[in-house]
Amino acid sequence: MKKYSFKKGWIPPDGLAFSGDTDFPREPVLELFTPKQIVLPMLQHRGTPAIPTVLPGEKVKIGQIVGKPSSAMCAPVHASVSGSVTGIETILLPHGSECRAIIIQNDLKREYHPSIRKRANPDRLTREELWKLLDYSGVVGMGRNGIPTAAKCRKAERIGVETLLVNACQSEPFLSSDIHLVREQTDRVIRGAFVLAGLCRAKRVIFCILDKWEAELDALRRNFKKQREVFPDRDLGLRVFRSRYPQGYEKLLIKAIYDTELPVGSSGEETVGAVVFNASTCAAVWNMVDRNQPLTSRVISISNDSAGGHNILVPIGTKVSEILERVPGAASSRRIVMGGPITGIALENRDTPVIKTTTGIVMVRYFDPPKTACIHCGACVEACPVGLLPYICDRLIQMNQEEALQHEHIGSCISCGACSYVCPAGIDLSARIGSAAVRLRKEQENE
Ligand code: SF4
Ligand code: SF4
C-alpha cells in the first residue's frame, strides 16, 4: 500500500503513540454533556460576527437560531440547550478578540426545536434545497480553520474543483475527535462529504487518513463497498499517510498527494483543483441534511499529559470550567490548553466556552522545562515541515530585520508549533514566527 508523506515534520517518540496505542480513541464517546449554562459567542469562525436575534428573558429550544449571519463570511449560531436567555455580554475570546455572546441558562429539559426531525428522503433534495440547508446549518470548518462551510463551498464551485479531500489526518497528539467520528459514524461522514462534493461540483471524494488508524481504515473500506453498491456512479478514493506531525495541514496534504507546493496565500482550490473539508465538518453537514439538525454540539478530546483521556460530546458554548469540574485531576493542572498540546492556546480564563472549532482540551500538569538561550542544536530546522530555519527567523524577528525575514520566506509558516515543541531551550518560536508571518503577509497585501 502506497503511503503518502512530506519531508521533515515530527514523529514524536511517544506523542502520536499516545492516542494510537491506548484505548482512549476507541472508547465509546461519553454521552452529551449537560452544562448548567452556556455562553454562545457570535464569532466562532473566520469572517464577521453573527447578529443576536434573541433578547434577555426569551425562552429558546435546541437548534433555534439565536444569531443571524451578518455577511457571506458568517455562519448563523443556534441554541445548544433549551432554557432562558439571561444576558448578552461582550466576552474575550482565547486568541484575544472580543465579541458579543448570548448567555443561556439550561432548563435541563433538553427540548428540541420542532423543525429538527428525521427527513424521509435526504438523498432526493435539490441543489437549491441543499444550499439553503447549508446556509442555515451554521457549519464551519471544525478542524482549525473555521471558514464558514457554505462560503468555502461557493468558492470551490466558482473556481471549479475536481476533487474533494476529506481530512481525517488528525496528527496532533492527544486529539482523536475526528477519528472517533470516522469510525463510529462512518456513514454520516461519507454522506456529508458527498453532499459537499455535489454542491462544489467536485467529481470525486478522497479520504485522507494516517496509517496508524487501522480500525478506522477498515471502517472506511467496509463502508466504501456499501456506498459503491448503492451509488455505483460515485467516485470514492482513499489515501493513506505516514503518521507524522503535522500531516493534517492543507498545505502538507496537497504537497503529499500532488507533489505541489501551495504558494503563500493560495489554496488547494486554485492550485490543484481540490477543496479540503475536515471529517467532523462532513458529519455535521449530514446531520443538517438528514435530521435538519444545525451545528449545536461537537465531539472534543479531553486529555492530560499522563496518558488518559476521553472523547465527549458537548453542547457548543459549554464553559471549560464546567467540563473540568467533572474531570478527575483537573484541579491540579498547571495549565489548561484549548485545542491540541502543540497548537492550542493556554487559557487565561477557564470560563471560556467550547466553540465550533474546539477540537480538544489538554490539562498540563508537569512544569515546563527551564528556558535557556538557543543552543543551536538544529532540532527546530529538522522539524519545520515547510523548510524554514526557525532559530534564524527568531533571531531576525528580534533584530527587526523585515527584509531578511522575507528572504527566509517567513510567510510560509503554517503555525504548526512543531519547532516550539521540539526546542530543548523552551523557546516559543512558533508564536513569534507565526505572528510575524501574519503581520508581514498583511503588509504585503496592503502594498
Ligand atoms: S510553526 Fe512555522 S516555523 Fe515552526 S515548525 Fe511550524 S511552520 Fe515551521
Ligand atoms: S531547537 Fe531551539 S535550541 Fe535548537 S536550534 Fe532551534 S531554537 Fe535553538
Image (spheres, helix red, strand yellow):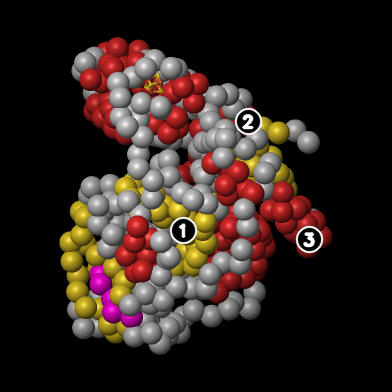
Residue 133 location, x and y as percent? 48, 66
Q: Position of residue 117 (x, y in %)?
A: 53, 80
Q: Which residue is mark 1?
A: 302
Going 64% across and 44% down the picture, which residue do you hit?
Answer: 209
Q: Is residue 122 visible?
A: yes
**What residue is at 23 percent from the left and 20 percent from the top?**
398
- The amino acid pointed to by label 3 is Lys
Residue drawn at point x = 40 percent, y = 53 percent? 363
Find out if the beta carbon at label 2 lies less than 8 Å from the nearest ligand 1 atom: no
**How far separated are the C-alphas under marks 2 and 3?**
29 Å
Q: Nearer the viewer, residue 306 or 88?
A: 306
Membership of 46 in magenta stretch? no
Image quadrant of ligand 2 equals top left
Mark 2 or mark 1, earlier in chain: 2
Pick whichever, 175 or 279, lies toward us.
Answer: 175
What residue is shown with label 2?
5
* Occupied quadrant, residue 320: bottom left
> Secondary structure under badge 2?
loop
Label 3 environment density (alpha carbons within 10 Å; few <14, some 14–19, many ≥20): few
- Which mark is first along the chain, 3 or 2? 2
**Residue receiving disc 3:** 226
